[in-house]
Amino acid sequence: MKASDWISVKDRLPRVNTGVLVCCQVEEQQWIEFATITRNDFKELRWYDASGFDLTTVTHWQKFVFPKKIKL
């Protein structure tokens, strides 16, 4: 994962209801979450983490890519 892999939410958003990795930032603190962008009851786009909590500090996102499957 490189810094250039991240897409700014100002440039583009992922498809609605698709899980992605997001970077959140509050002041100087940054962290990564697994999240989905969804339309709420008022038809507004909102970010929600895997537990269903509203995320308001998303700055960047990128597709989540699984590793290659291991042959068993």
Image (cartoon, rainbow, N blue to C red):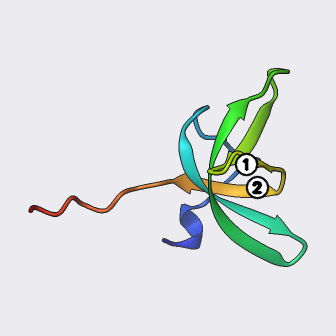
The C terminus - image quarter: bottom left
Reading the image, the residue beneath label 1 is 9
- Side of 16 where 24 appears, left or right: right
Q: Nearer the viewer, mark 1 or mark 2?
A: 2
Dot 1 amino acid type: Val
Residue 5, quarter of the rendered image: bottom right
Residue 25, quarter of the rendered image: bottom right
State the image coordinates of residue 2 (x, y, percent, origin top left): 52, 72
Residue located at (76% from left, 73% from top): 30
Residue at the front extreme, as displayed: 51
**Viewer-proximal residue among 10 and 32:** 32
Residue 46, quarter of the rendered image: top right
Reading the image, the residue beneath label 2 is 58
Q: Are marks 1 and 2 in contact (CB under 8 Å)?
A: yes
Residue at the top extreme, as displayed: 42
- Tell me how far mark 1 sits from mark 2, CA to CA: 7 Å
